[in-house]
Image (spheres, rainbow, N blue to C red):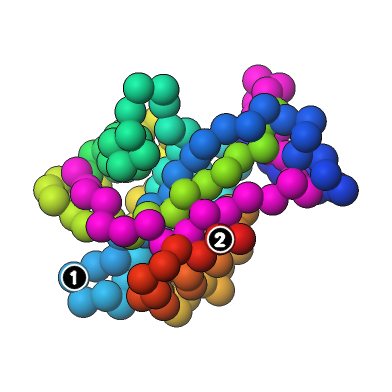
Amino acid sequence: MTYILYGERIGKQGELRLGCSAVLFDKDHVKILLTRRTDNGMWCLLGGMIEAGESVAEGCAREFWEETGLRVRVIRLTGVYSDPHHVVIYPDGNQACIVVLNFEVELLSGEPVLSHETTGVDWFPIHEAVEMDLFHGHADHIRDALTGQDAAFIR
């Protein structure tokens, strides 16, 4: 199971990694797409690690495709998130301090499907989603995307 440890500057115990998360609103901008993680059962935004040799937009679109079968395009960067006081521990024992870029994306094509990383894919009313016990910080990512602010939040 993937979990997060918290502590004063504990992030330095992990390898620095670049990740992404993505907010996909429905056409009426009242619902948001979330997935349920296979590793810990929590609902979350779609996303994952950016791989060497791809742009952050390509990585975000690839992660979205891998997790849902949906093709998306990045519209804008809504936030940059880093926290030196937590470290992510993966089932294989690897530890990571992750800097997450959150993007708003638009749907290009496809129908949502499950993957080996997801046990659920569903649309939630935005007002409910931000009150859910989502994976680490994802409710804040949604709230920041909702503002429509031109400049990305840096947190």
**What type is the residue that disc 2 sits on?**
Ile
The structure residue drawn at horizontal position 47% and vertical position 49%, both measured from the top left corner, is 101
The structure residue drawn at horizontal position 30% and vertical position 77%, both measured from the top left corner, is 30
Q: Main secondary structure of the magenta part?
A: strand
**Looking at the picture, does residue 79 appear above or below residue 116?**
below
**Disc 1 from disc 2: Cα separation:** 27 Å
Residue 35 visible (yes or no) = no
Residue 27, labelled with which disc? 1
**Looking at the picture, does residue 137 appear above or below residue 86?**
below
**Residue 53, located in which quarter of the rendered image?**
top left
The structure residue drawn at horizontal position 41% and vertical position 26%, both measured from the top left corner, is 51
**What type is the residue that disc 1 sits on?**
Lys
Determine whether the residue tagged by mark 2 lies in a helix, strand or loop. strand
Q: Which residue is mark 2?
A: 154
Residue sticking out furthest to the left: 109
In magenta stretch: residue 18: no
**Image check: 2 left or right of 38?**
right
Mark 1 closeness class: few <14, some 14–19, many ≥20 residues within 10 Å: few
The structure residue drawn at horizontal position 29% and vertical position 66%, both measured from the top left corner, is 25
Residue 4 visible (yes or no) = yes
In the rendered image, the quadrant that contains the N terminus is top right
Is 51 or 28 nearer to us in this picture?
51
Residue 17 horizontal/vertical position (percent): 57, 32
Magenta stretch?
A: 71-94
